[in-house]
Amino acid sequence: MVKPMLFQIVGYQNSGKTTLSLTLIKRLTAAGLKVATVKHHGHGGKPDIAKEKDSERHIGAGAVVSIVEGGGRLVVHAEKEQWSLAEEINVVSSFQADVILIEGYKRESYPKAVILRNEADIELVKDLANIQVVFYRDPIVVNLLKDCPCPVFQMEDHRGIVWVLEYLLDQV
C-alpha cells in the first residue's frame, strides 16, 4: 500500500468519533506507526484559535499563514476561503505519517468506519461509500444491520478496535 494509509471515522455529532480516533492514535503509535489526523469542524464557522496570542494577531492582520514553533512543537494557523480535504491531506502528508485518520467528511470515499448512535443514523450505512466496519451504540440498531456486508461491533466491544487495528496494519 502507498503511504500514507487514509482512513475515515464518521458519524453524527456525539457518536464517539473522537473517542475512537484517540484510541486508534494511541494503539497505532504504540505499534510504532506515525499517525496524522484531519478533523472536520462540524459546528459551523471557524474553529477557535488561542486569543490574544501573536499568531492570532498575525492572522487577524491579514496573514494567510502563521507558524509558531517552540520546544519541537509546530502550530500552524492558516486562512483561506475554503479548504478541500485533498488540500488538508496534502498539508499533513508533509509530516510523513504512516496513517492519516480523517474524522468526519462523511461523503468522501476513503475507507471508513461508521459510528451509529441510534436507529435514526442507519441511513449512513445506506448512503456512504467504502464502509469497512460499523460501530453502534444502541443495541436495537444491530437488528437493522443483519444484511450489512461489513463487520459490525458494539462501540464498547474491544474486538471492534482490534479489527480496525488489524485492518490498518495490513494496509501499511
Image (tube, rainbow, N blue to C red):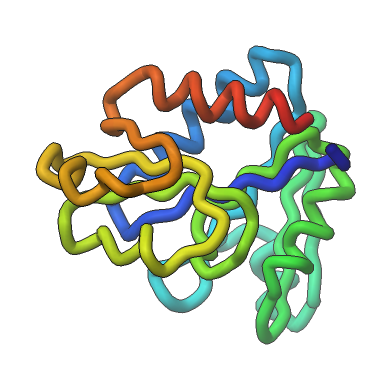
Q: What residue appears at the point 57 percent right and 62 percent down from the top-left corner?
A: 52
Residue 4's x, y, as percent? 81, 42
Instruction: Please name whichever residue, 93 or 51, is drawn nearer the observer in this view of the structure.
Output: 93
The furthest residue to the front: 147
Instruction: Please name whichever residue, 8 or 21, is drawn nearer the observer in this view of the structure.
Output: 8
Tell me: residue 92, above or below residue 157.
below
Left or right relative to 3: residue 49: left
Quadrant in which the C terminus appears? top right
Tell me: residue 120, above or below residue 75.
below
Quarter of the image where one finds residue 166: top right
The number of numbered badges drawn on the structure is 0
Left or right relative to 89: residue 124: left
Q: What residue appears at the point 70 percent right and 34 percent down from the top-left corner?
A: 35
Instruction: Please name whichever residue, 39 or 1, is drawn nearer the observer in this view of the structure.
Output: 1
Quadrant in which the N terminus appears? top right
Instruction: Please name whichever residue, 120 or 97, is drawn nearer the observer in this view of the structure.
Output: 120
Q: What residue appears at the point 37 percent right and 58 percent down from the top-left corner?
A: 125
Quarter of the image where one finds residue 56: bottom right
Residue 40's x, y, as percent? 53, 62
Residue 115's x, y, as percent? 35, 47
Tell me: residue 51, above or below residue 164.
below
Quarter of the image where one finds residue 143: top left
Residue 84's x, y, as percent? 70, 74
